[in-house]
C-alpha cells in the first residue's frame, strides 16, 4: 500500500473504501509486465484526484515514476517528462502537497525551506535560513538594500524561533503566523501543514474560521470542497459548506464529482496571472551603457553655486560624508560631483563583459588600466561571487580607491598585500565576509601578521579566509577579550606560524564565537 497504515487507519470508512479501490487498481497495473505501467499508475492516481483530496504519498509516488522514466529514457524525451512533472506538481499543489522544489514562474512558496534568493520577496517572511539568504542577497544586489528590508529581516529572524516553538499548540502557532502580516505566508504554511497531515481537523477549522472572518469567501469555498472530499462522512461540515455556497458561490472547482449544490461551479478556469512564468531578463535586453553621457556631463553644470551654508562648511561636509550622504549630494547637484568625483560602487566584480547596472560594475577578465574608474568608493561587495575569474590578473587597483566600506571582500589570487593595504579595506569595521586566502599577506617587516591585529578590525565578521597568520603568546587572550557583534560561520587559515600559545584559551575563543 502506498498510503501509510497509520494514515489509512485514521481515515473515515467511506474514504478507506475509495482508497482500497485505488490501491487495488494500482496493484493490478504493477503486476503486468508493461513498459507503460508507470504512466498507467500516474493516470489512475490522477483520475482518483479528480474526485477526492489525494494524500501526498500518491503524488510522491507519481514523481518517483517520472524520475524513473527520465533516467531510463532518451534525452530527447526529457522535455516531455519535464512537462508531465510540472503538470503533476501543479495538480498536487491544489491537493495541498508541497515540496521545496514546487516552484513555477512567480508561484513560489513562502515556507521554511531553502531556495535560491532572487529578490526581496524571499526575505520578508520567517525562515530558518533567513540570515544566510539576506547575506546572499546583499552579495548579489546591484545597489544597497533598503533600511526597510533590514528592519523587516530583523523582525522575521526574531519571530521565527517563536513560531517553531509553538508548533505543538495550533492556536498559538496560528496567532504567531498572523503577526507576519502576510496572507500568502499564512496560507502557504497552514496548507503545507494540512497537506502533511490531512487528519488535523483542528487546524482545518481554525483556517476555515480565519477565511470567514477575513471575507475571503471564494477561497473559503475551495477549502470547504477539499475538506469534504477527504472527510467523506462529515455531514455536519457538508451542511455548513452548502450554506456558504448558497451565500457566496459559485466558484471554480476542478472536481468531476460535484455535489448538487456545487453545480454551476464547473465553469472554465480563469488563468491565474500569478502562475505565469516570469520572463527572465537576459543581458541582451539591457540597454548598452552610452559612454558619451560622461563626456557631456560637465557641459551642463553651473560652476558657481549659492548655498545657505558657507562654502568651507559645504566642502567640509563633502569631504567627510559617507556614501549615504554623498548619494544625496550627487543627486541634488552636479557641482558636488565635480568637486569630489568619487563614483559610488556597491558591487565590483569580474566577468566576461564590462557591464554597468545600478551601482554595480563588472570588469572584464583582463581589464585595461583606463577602464578602471578613478577614486572609486566601494560600499558593498568587492569581487565576492566572481569565482570563475579568481585567477584573473588585475591592475594595481588599491591606489585607485577613494574609500572602501565593503561588507564582502574576496581578492583574486596572487596579490601581494601589505597589512596597511589590508587595513585600508577593512578598517571601517563593517566587513562580514573576508576572503584573501589566495593572496600573500605581510607586514612592513615582510613578516606574517599577528591574528589579533587583523581581528581587531573585524568586529562584524562571519566568514573569514586568511592565507597566513602569526600566533603570539598574547594572541588567544587578546582574542577572547575582543567583542564580536556576530557569531562566526567559518574561519579558515592556510598557514599558522609564530610562538607557542595557550591552546585552551584559543579554544575558548572559538567556542564562544562560533555559530552553534
Image: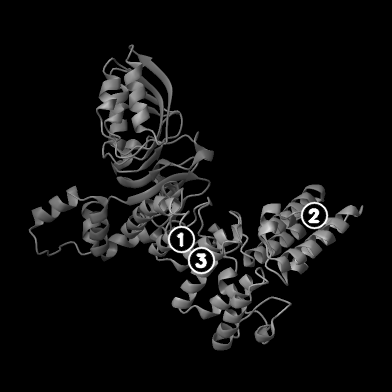
Residue, x 35% and y 17% (percent of image)? 503
Badge 3 is on which residue?
A: 187
Among all residues in the image, which is located at the extreme top?
500
Residue 142 located left or right of residue 233: left
96 or 351, which is in the foreground? 96
Q: Place residue 220 in its image quadrant.
A: bottom right
Residue 143 placement: quadrant: bottom left
User: Going from the N terminus, do you reach mark 2 or mark 1 first?
Assistant: 2
- Measure the alpha-carbon separation of dots 2 and 1: 35 Å
Q: Residues within 10 Å of mark 3 (few under 14, many from 20)?
A: some
- In the rendering, at what x and y percent does residue 418 appear? 32, 26
- Residue 106: tell me if it is visible: no
Looking at the image, is 322 positioned above or below residue 261? Answer: above
The image shows residue 456 at horizontal and vertical percentages of 26, 30
Instruction: Name the residue beneath numbered marker 2.
Output: 76
Q: Residue at label 1?
A: 121
| Secondary structure beneath label 1 | helix
Crowdedness near tag 1: few (<14), some (14–19) or many (≥20) residues, C-alpha within 10 Å? few
Hey, which residue is sitting farthest right in the picture?
33
Amino acid at each position: 500500500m502506498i498510503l501509510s497504515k497509520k494514515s489509512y487507519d485514521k481515515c473515515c470508512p467511506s474514504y478507506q473504501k475509495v482508497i482500497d479501490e485505488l490501491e487495488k487498481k494500482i496493484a493490478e497495473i504493477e503486476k503486468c509486465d508493461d513498459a507503460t505501467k508507470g504512466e498507467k499508475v500516474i493516470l489512475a492516481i490522477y483520475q482518483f484526484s479528480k474526485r477526492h483530496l489525494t494524500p501526498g504519498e500518491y503524488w510522491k509516488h507519481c514523481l518517483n515514476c517520472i524520475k524513473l522514466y527520465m533516467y531510463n529514457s532518451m534525452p530527447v524525451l526529457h522535455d516531455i517528462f519535464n512537462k508531465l512533472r510540472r503538470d503533476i506538481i501543479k495538480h498536487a499543489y491544489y491537493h495541498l502537497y508541497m515540496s521545496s522544489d514546487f516552484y513555477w514562474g512567480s508561484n513560489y512558496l513562502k515556507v521554511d525551506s531553502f531556495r535560491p534568493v532572487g529578490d526581496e520577496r524571499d526575505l520578508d517572511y520567517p525562515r530558518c535560513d533567513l540570515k544566510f539568504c539576506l547575506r546572499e542577497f546583499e552579495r548579489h544586489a546591484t545597489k544597497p538594500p533598503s533600511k526597510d528590508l533590514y528592519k523587516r529581516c530583523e523582525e522575521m529572524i526574531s519571530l521565527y524561533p517563536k513560531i517553531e516553538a509553538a508548533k505543538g499548540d495550533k492556536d498559538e502557532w496560528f496567532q504567531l503566523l498572523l503577526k507576519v502580516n502576510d496572507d500568502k505566508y499564512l496560507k502557504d504554511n497552514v496548507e503545507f501543514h494540512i497537506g502533511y497531515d490531512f487528519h488535523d481537523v483542528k487546524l482545518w477549522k481554525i483556517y476555515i474560521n480565519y477565511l470567514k472572518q477575513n471575507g475571503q469567501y471564494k477561497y473559503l469555498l475551495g477549502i470547504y470542497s477539499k475538506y469534504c472530499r477527504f472527510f467523506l462522512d462529515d455531514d455536519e461540515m457538508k451542511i455548513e459548506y452548502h450554506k456558504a455556497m448558497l451565500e457566496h458561490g459559485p466558484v471554480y472547482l476542478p472536481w468531476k464529482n460535484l455535489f448538487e449544490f456545487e453545480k454551476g461551479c464547473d465553469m472554465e478556469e480563469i488563468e491565474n496571472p500569478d502562475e505565469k512564468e516570469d520572463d527572465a531578463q537576459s543581458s541582451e535586453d539591457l540597454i548598452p551603457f552610452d559612454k558619451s553621457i560622461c563626456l557631456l556631463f560637465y557641459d551642463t553644470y553651473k560652476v558657481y553655486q549659492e548655498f545657505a551654508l558657507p562654502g568651507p562648511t559645504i566642502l567640509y561636509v563633502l569631504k567627510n560624508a559617507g556614501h549615504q550622504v554623498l548619494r544625496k549630494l550627487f543627486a541634488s547637484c552636479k557641482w558636488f560631483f565635480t568637486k569630489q568625483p568619487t563614483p559610488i560602487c556597491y558591487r565590483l566584480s569580474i566577468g566576461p563583459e564590462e557591464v554597468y547596472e545600478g551601482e554595480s560594475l563588472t570588469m572584464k577578465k583582463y581589464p585595461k588600466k583606463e577602464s578602471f574608474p578613478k577614486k572609486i568608493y566601494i560600499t558593498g561587495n568587492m569581487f565576492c561571487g566572481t569565482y570563475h575569474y579568481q585567477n584573473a590578473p588585475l591592475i594595481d587597483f588599491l591606489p585607485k580607491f577613494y574609500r572602501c566600506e565593503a561588507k564582502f571582500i574576496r581578492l583574486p589570487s596572487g596579490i601581494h598585500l601589505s597589512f596597511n593595504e589590508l587595513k585600508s579595506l577593512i578598517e571601517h569595521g563593517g566587513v562580514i565576509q573576508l576572503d584573501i586566502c589566495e593572496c600573500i599577506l605581510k607586514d612592513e617587516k615582510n613578516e606574517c601578521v599577528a591574528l589579533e591585529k587583523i581581528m581587531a578590525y573585524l568586529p562584524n565578521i562571519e566568514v573569514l579566509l586568511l592565507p597566513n597568520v602569526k600566533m603570539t603568546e598574547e594572541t588567544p587572550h587578546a582574542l577572547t577579550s575582543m567583542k564580536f557583534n556576530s557569531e562566526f560561520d567559518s574561519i579558515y587559515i592556510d598557514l599558522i606560524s609564530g610562538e607557542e600559545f595557550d591552546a585552551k584559551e584559543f579554544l575558548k575563543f572559538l567556542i564562544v564565537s562560533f555559530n552553534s
